[in-house]
Amino acid sequence: ELTHDLEIKELEARQQDALDRELEEKCRAMEAQLQEKEKDNLELRKELRHKETLVAALRSSLRTKERRFLEELKRRSHRVTILDTELQKQTEAAAYLS
């Protein structure tokens, strides 16, 4: 009976060792996966920072172009007003002369 108990305990110990090895292998695999995911995450963060920089540059460029466009629009509007005034004067002069 003691021999049987001893054999059972040895069998349980071997099973536990096998289970421990299996769990260690799974743990190593999960740690490797985690490291890979962290590496991917780092690359994605670098890419995100780069794209944020590009977006900031594009926004700045857009603001500059918008400001130039508004200034040009203002100049042209002023020029149209001047030309309209001159045309009105000439029309009035032509009407007076006729």
Image (tube, rainbow, N blue to C red):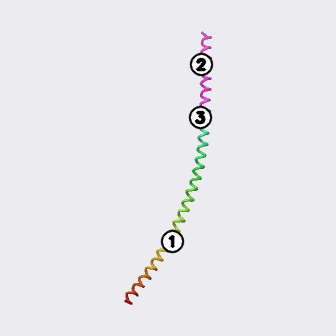
**Secondary structure mostly taken by the magenta-highlighted segment of the chain:** helix
Q: Position of residue 32 (x, y in %)?
A: 62, 36
- Residue at figure coordinates x 59%, y 38% from the top left: 34
Q: CA distance from mark 1 to mark 2?
A: 87 Å
Left-right relation of 50 to 80: right
Quarter of the figure with the C terminus = bottom left
Q: Which residue lies under the disc numbered 1? A: 72
Sequence-first tag of 1 and 3:
3
Q: Is residue 68 above or below residue 13?
A: below
Q: Residue furthest front?
A: 98
From the image, state whether disc 1 or disc 3 is nearer to you: 1
Circle 2: element type: helix
Q: Is residue 45 above or below residue 63?
A: above
Specify the amino acid type for callout 2: Glu
Disc sitting over residue 94 in the figure: none
Q: Which span is picked out in magenta?
A: 1-30
Q: CA distance from mark 1 to mark 3?
A: 62 Å
Q: Is residue 12 above or below residue 1?
A: below
Q: Which residue lies under the disc numbered 2? A: 12
Specify the amino acid type for callout 1: Glu
Disc sitting over residue 30 in the figure: 3
